[in-house]
Image (spheres, rainbow, N blue to C red):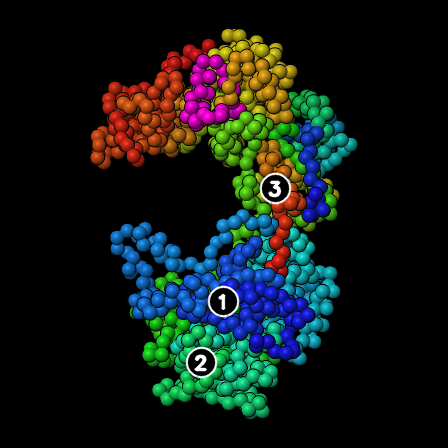
Amino acid sequence: MTRLPAGGQINRDKTLSFRFNGKQYQGFEGDTLASALLANNVRLIARSFKYHRPRGIVSAGPEEPNALVQVHGTDDEPNLRATTLKLYEGLDASSINCWPGPSFDLGAINSLLSPLLPAGFYYKTFMLGRWDRYAKFIRRAAGLGKTPTASRRRRYEKRFHHVDVLVVGAGFAGLEAALKAAQSGSKVVLIDSNDEPGGELLNQRANHPNRSALEQLLTSVDGSENINRIVRTTASGYYDHNLVIAVQQQPADAAWIYERLWHIRAKQVILATGAVERPLVFANNDLPGVMLAGAAQSYLNRYAVACGKKILLFTNNSSAYQAAFDLADAGLEIVSIVDARSQVDDELLEECKQRSIEVQVNAVVINASGGRRIRHASVAGRRDLSDYRDYACDLICVSGGWNPLVHLHSQSGAKPIYSSDSAAFVPGESVQNERSVGACAGDFSNNRIRYDIEALWKVETTTTFGKAFVDFQNDVTTADLELALRENYSSIEHVKRYTTAGMATDQGKIGGANVIGVVADQVGAEPGEVGTTTYRPPFTPVSFGVLAGVDRGPLILPARTTPMTQWNIKAGAAMNEAGAGFRRPFWFPVTGESTTDAISRAAHAVRTKVGIYDATPLGKFELHGPDVGILLNRLYTNRFDDLTEGQGRFGLMLHEDGRLLDDGVTFRMDDHWLMTCGTGAASGVLRHIERLLQTEWTDLQVYVVNVTSQWANICVCGPRAREVVTAVGTDIDLDVAFEFMQMKTGRVAEVSARVARVSYTGELSFEINVRRRDAMTVWQTLMDVGKRWDITPVGSETSAVLRIEKGFISAGTEGDNITNPYDAGLGWMIDMDKGDFIGRRTLIRDKKLNIPRQHVVGLLPDDEEFVVAEGSALLPQANSRDFQGHVTASCYSPTLGRSIALALLKNGHNRHGEKILISGLHRAVSADICRPVFYDPRGERMRS
Amino acid sequence: LNHYDVVIERLDAVALINLRCEESTATAIGDTIGLVFPIALFQIVETDAVQVVRLSPDQWWIRTRFTEEGALLDQLTVASRDHFAAVTVISDHFQGFSLSGADVNAVLNQALSVNLADLPAGSVIRARFARTGATVFMREPEIRSEVFVESSYGDYAEQWLQTAAGMIHEESAPSTARL
């Protein structure tokens, strides 16, 4: 055990048991998994992504690139950072990206093959042949943890919030900023990813001089009514108009929620996100036991864990000395401080002297050696690398300086700038109402550290020692960067993409600056000239669960219902999405019946007896005003202003380009008009009309009101439909005087109703429109009374068969944004003499151009039992590349006892009687081209 | 039973009548039948059993008890006869829900991106609500609101509200071990 007998901010009274890679360990309340593993002397935590090199814990925070673990059990979750994963009783975690384990990993063979696997290896090697053959192997080898497959019981939530000032980060600077804003009268939200406020001060020793000031500040903050401090909340994205997305873990106000996603809109955002330490780049700097100096200090002061007994510290700045002093004062041996700078502050040297710590100035570590943990460090003078000396040690603490966390600043649209004083990128000019304070602005004064630094992006060394890593998580080395530059990827954005540096889950938090520095050195430029890559959300990985929130399972997509939906479900209907979010019955199978049989049985019932279907989802709009007739004349290709009360007419609505937009029937009522349109097109049609009325035809006095859900529509269809509707009781005369395309009002089944004679099946049909709340009463009465005529519920697939038999055009099927009404055989619906209408000009142009177009035709396959696939190509003969059209709709017609299809075919109107080859995915079949009306071509049955 | 202190109830006995006309016409119609039509957008004017809300420059909702729907419709129809106006019953086109309790805003904040603090009692908003759209009446801020969605979205909205309210059911025992 490396736990010190005293100190730390852990609760030693509460011991917690946990498992890691199958072994049982113990830690304390207040530990992270990382601190508990280190306390149990577990150093080898993971294997690296590409070369499967042994890796240990590098940091003590969310920037951790190595120690990613998979948590098992009910909390199964991949890629959690051991450095932020709070220890709890029963935690069961394991390493990822290794098999059978991190100590012996078969994937480590990649390390031997590493000369063959430089940056860009994939792009160069797998460009030959079929990529899909390689892809599955590469994808299997890549990746990190395993996605859980079991359904979660966890609850997630999303919240919108508005506030005057949002402060991100509750370190010293963030607390100060929040208090000042609150004192000025602003409402403040202060978020922090930790349980406790204090930021970097939490990593310092208990008697740090700023501790008491922090406590006073915290008392004032928590006493302010204007400040809402939210803990365990990480800002993950910063978007336009000062919108910050933050993820809160287990909110204190709602213990049943696992994570909450905040959408916080702030008038001003203050970023106090601090800074993270970066490593130094030398050979084998990735071995377990190379750790950031600040992390070793944090494990010591927060968790009372000694990460090593013989410690060598390598730095290029003054901040790391305090870590050395804390470690030394805890009784640990500092074998040497290797400082790359040419000059060190006398005060620091004096403190080292008091502790008998050797300091080597103008020196560097050129290599670390060991197997699964550090054994030696090789130290040389900066000017003469060949003359080096080995130090035995079990921990190398490194500090290459501090990277202000400018991620959110960058996400806000601003551009970080390079500061040579702090050898780091700091916030540039704000582009939103945002400012950065404290360490994330490059100001480290709150921790009373005198911060002197000399930039050192990499230690020049020979390749005989091994790889020097700039990005631990994606295994990117200095050699990879040099290769990218040699191959002319000069932009830092291109270097990033070619090498994948900074593209992993840690987003290059600790290594990004070194990547830029190495590239700058290589091209002879300043880091500021190279610039940063774009920081993108999320700042730290975000779970899919919290992104979904409550919108999971049945709430993923809103399912729109009609009053008959539950009846349909109880009747055993196969329900499915049928446009605009409506769930509709596709067919109603009875026991032991196939889908095809169920569809055919219902179609046969409509042709011979009576069927009933729920047409409620059709779009319905009331049009009011004196100019409705003029409006409809302009919207549709045919005339409407001559309709009299109670009459309806089928209309074609076109886009400006003359292509089919929608079709439907519009009735003239007593004091208004009722327009119907396709389910899926309804919202688009309403927008279309409103846009025209509000922007183009402002002179027209027309109001449009959506009544789609006000009225349920029950269609009774078939030769016995009149008898059924009469039998349920109605005061409407349903006799032949009630003509096709008329609407009458009255009562049906003792309910007020509007009954229309329209037909989408080709049979005698009555569409009974009643208020939504009355619909089930009418439906159930029709079903009960209709038993005498064997009334059959009809789904939309049956409806499709019936419309194909009749050759009724579907605007969303035969109309494919190319088809015009002439192509669809609907030229009889165009009235060129009535005046202008939308699409008229293009129709005239289409005719004058006289270019061969695809027309709607019918097809009768030679194999009468074979139902061709919709979408099949139409070819003159086998193996031809002369694509002449495609099948738009196809079915087995129970009425005709054979397969039929509708298609769009080049010059189809003039090819009736010819043969064409229908080429499907698995089979080709010859077919006769014919008129697209297979049943009752004169329409006598629906007018009967 | 919900984790949040919210009671969700369907509003089935509500009559809604949609009026589209110019502002001057609305005033004239109101004068005729003794109703005050609000001039300010998204404001409710309430008299005994009738509430009138202006939803757009040329649209009002008149709301009353369902039993009064026919009488109110007749009044409005007669009063608007000589004007360019559209009077339409939409009671069934919308499904209303009442939300009451101390945590009403905790539920509304999950669905609405607007700042609820800007919405005093007697105001109305139309906005995206969860994955549909809604008209929300702020009756008593923070403790009582009403949400109206197109009725085909009624079942979805009810389930969504119950889930957002943290409806307690056995299989949703939270996993709290990690923290």
Identify the magenta region: A588-616
Point 58% across, 39% down: residue: B133
Point 66% across, 65% down: residue: A178
| A613 left or right of A220 in image | left
Judged from the image, the secondary structure of the residue bearing numbered disc 2 is strand
Measure the alpha-carbon separation of dots 3 and 2: 59 Å
State whether residue A635 is above or below residue A290.
above
Question: Which chain hosts label 2?
Answer: A
| Amino acid at circle 1 | Ala
x then y, percent, for residue A859? 31, 23
Judged from the image, the secondary structure of the residue bearing numbered disc 3 is helix
Which is more toward the observer, B176 or A346? B176
Q: Which mark is residue A130?
A: none
Which is more toward the observer, B25 or A75? A75
Front disc: 3 or 1: 1
First of labels 2, 1 by sequence position:
1
Give the quarter of the figure containing the N terminus of chain B. top right
Q: Which residue is mark 3?
A: B160
In magenta segment, residue A603: yes
| Amino acid at circle 2 | Arg
Q: Which residue is mark 1?
A: A67
Measure the alpha-carbon separation of dots 3 and 1: 38 Å
Q: Quadrant of residue A50?
A: bottom left
- In the rendered image, residues at marks 2 and 1 fall on the same chain: yes
x then y, percent, for residue A926? 25, 26
Instruction: Categorize mark 3 by other alpha carbons within 10 Å: few (<14), some (14-19), many (20+).
Output: many
